């Protein structure tokens, strides 16, 4: 991939042969973010897992202490009292069966996270082909299939993020914005890493964390010292 002159100048600030301590890596990511918008800071974690085996899958959620800096739109599938409960908790959209054609036929996807009560999963399951590829399918491991819709919505709004292995066994997660303080980003990063370390599959033999890279949306990747974890 070819980069522009500006990017190449900035990239010189990062020594590709060094695995930095988290504090140094965060400072470098902020220094090398030169876009005109508030870039997202992302973590890319390469694991030694083989996601083709169910027992080596990693999937879960963690609440970042300082949020993601992004406004998250939540859709809740529920019925009866749970609809009112979801609305009171701050859900952006609520409904049931009537939302299926709107999503399937009209292509409505103005939401970032989907929460469903267990009794609605039969209905939501019909949206698998639409929501699945976009990573929007509710999942008990991520806490998005639950009867406690109040807790689910409030945690998501407060900065709860989901993590999972992609096809290349890498986890990609946002941990905030470049405008955050170094300390806020470090707290978010540490909260994520604690969750990832605890999520190590017991079936995995050998090295779990192969590499950790921090980067802003448009900036160069900065390697983080894996030995810390």
Image: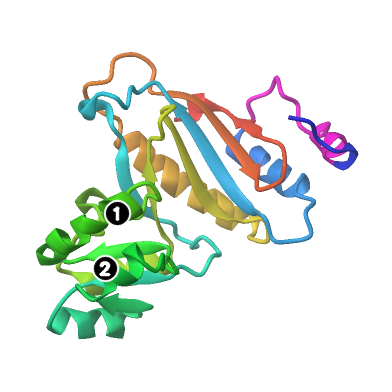
> Residue 217 at x, y = what percent?
66, 48
- Whether 13 is among the magenta residues is yes
Residue mark closest to the camera, 2 vs 1: 2
Tell me if residue 199 can be seen. Answer: yes
> Residue 209 at x, y = what percent?
43, 25
Can you say whether 179 is above or below 92 in the image? Answer: above
- Whether 102 is among the magenta residues is no
Tell me if residue 91 can be seen. Answer: no
> Residue 134 at x, y = what percent?
40, 50
Q: Nearer the viewer, residue 128 or 47?
A: 128
Q: Considering the image in quadrants, where does the N terminus appear?
A: top right
The residue at 43%/40% (across/down) is 193
Can you say whether 78 is above or below 1 in the image? Answer: below
> Residue 58 at x, y = what percent?
31, 36
The residue at which mark 2 appears reads as 100
Mark 2 nearby-residue class (10 Å; few <14, some 14–19, many ≥20):
some
Can you say whether 204 is above or below 84 in the image? Answer: above
Q: Nearer the viewer, residue 186 or 103?
A: 103
Extreme residue in the left direction: 119
The residue at which mark 1 appears reads as 137
- For the residues labelled 2 and 1, the Cα–Cα distance comes to 13 Å
The residue at 85%/38% (across/down) is 4
The residue at 39%/21% (across/down) is 48
Tell whether 229 sits left or right of 148.
Answer: right
Give the magenta range: 7-20
Helix, strand or loop at label 2? It is helix
Q: Nearer the viewer, residue 102 or 83?
A: 102
Q: Quadrant of residue 55?
A: top left
Q: Main secondary structure of the magenta part?
A: loop
Q: Quadrant of residue 124?
A: bottom left
Q: Quadrant of residue 214?
A: top right
């Amino acid at each position: 991939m070819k980069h522009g002159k500006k990017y190449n100048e900035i990239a010189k600030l990062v020594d590709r042969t060094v695995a930095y301590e988290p504090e140094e890596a965060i400072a470098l990511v902020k220094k090398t973010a030169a876009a005109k918008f508030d870039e997202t800071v992302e973590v890319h974690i390469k694991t030694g897992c083989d996601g083709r085996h169910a027992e080596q899958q990693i999937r879960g959620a963690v609440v970042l202490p300082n949020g993601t800096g992004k406004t998250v739109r939540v859709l809740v599938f529920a019925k009866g009292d749970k609809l009112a409960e979801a609305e009171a908790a701050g859900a952006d959209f609520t409904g049931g069966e009537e939302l299926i054609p709107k999503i399937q036929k009209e292509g409505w996807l103005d939401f970032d996270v989907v929460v469903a009560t267990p009794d609605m999963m039969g209905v939501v399951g019909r949206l698998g082909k639409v929501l699945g590829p976009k990573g929007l399918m509710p999942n008990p491991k991520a806490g998005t299939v639950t009867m406690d819709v109040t807790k689910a919505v409030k945690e998501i709004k407060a900065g709860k993020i989901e993590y999972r292995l992609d096809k290349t066994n890498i986890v990609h997660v946002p941990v905030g914005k470049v405008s955050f303080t170094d300390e806020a980003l470090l707290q978010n990063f540490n909260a994520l890493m604690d969750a990832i370390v605890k999520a190590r599959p017991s079936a995995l033999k050998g090295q779990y964390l192969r590499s950790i890279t921090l980067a802003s949306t448009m900036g160069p990747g900065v390697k983080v010292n894996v030995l810390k974890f």
